[in-house]
Image (tube, grey):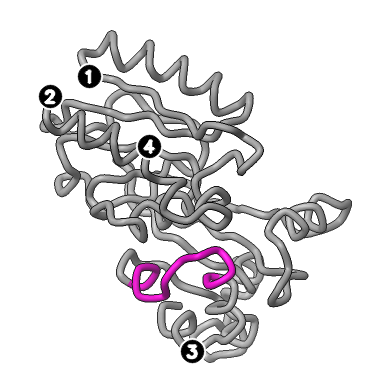
Amino acid sequence: MRAALLHSRRARAYLEERGIPLEIALATGVGYLPEEMLRLPEAKGKWEVLHRWAERIVFPLVSLAGSGYVGRTLWGWHPGMDENAHKSLLDRPRRPRRWIKTNPAGWFCSDLDQLARKLILVEGAFDRLTLIAAGFQATEVVALVGTAAPADWFPPHVDTVILALDADEGGREASNKLADRLTREGFDVRVHLPQQEKWGKDWNERWRRMGDQAIQAISDVYVEARSA
């Protein structure tokens, strides 16, 4: 799938539209499952499982229960199509689900024992790639691929968590719950949601609209946490 991502013009164009350098996607294990791969001999007998993942950008996930994947469909997308327009298309009846996960699922991040002492938690896989593209280390950013974080998954060396979830109602509610719980568990918790939602509710959308300016505030929060 990583080779398919490298050679697929369509998948590369999608990453480019979202402001994600191809080399960062490849370095973090991102792949692509084109429909033609389902016709390979290796896929024989697995079509029923694999067809759900066809035409998806695929992200590897890490969890205490083992590895997993989450996939974002490219069905109906074409170069030049705005991400919000694609979302609206997929929200119509009888369209493929935008995201699907394996079970166990997990989080899009580095191996747990390699994570930095101070972590930034974001919601989406593309938000993590965005922060890495902006200069953060891959070990510093964890994508929850949702808003849930189990109580016992943080490695013992982690001491600080910056919650940088989406600036919508779900993100704010999840941030408040996570902040309360993680504070009780002894972590230094800081909450920094994207400001001025008119520029986008998540880091990737703001990055595409504002460039480095969108990331500066969270960079300042992280530098402050590191120096504390």
Please tell me whether mark 1 or mark 2 is closer to you in this view.
Answer: 2
Could you say which is closer to the camera, residue 140 or residue 67? 140
Asked whether the beta carbons under mark 1 and mark 2 sit within 8 Å of each other, the answer is: yes
Task: Quickly name the residue at label 3.
Answer: 7
Q: Three-letter amino acid code at disc 4? A: Ala
The Cα atoms of the two marked residues, 4 and 1, are separated by: 18 Å
Q: Secondary structure at mark 3?
A: helix
Which label's residue is closer to the chain start, 4 or 1?
1
Q: CA distance from mark 4 to mark 3?
A: 36 Å
Q: Residue at x 47, y 30 (%)?
A: 193
| Label 1 element class | strand
Q: Amino acid at mark 3?
A: His
Sequence-wise, the earlier of marks 3 and 1 is 3
Please give the range of residues in magenta: 15-26
Circle number at residue 188 = 1
Q: Position of residue 203 (x, y in %)?
A: 49, 46
Return the mark for residue 217: 4
* Amino acid at pointer 1: Asp
| Disc assigned to residue 84 | none
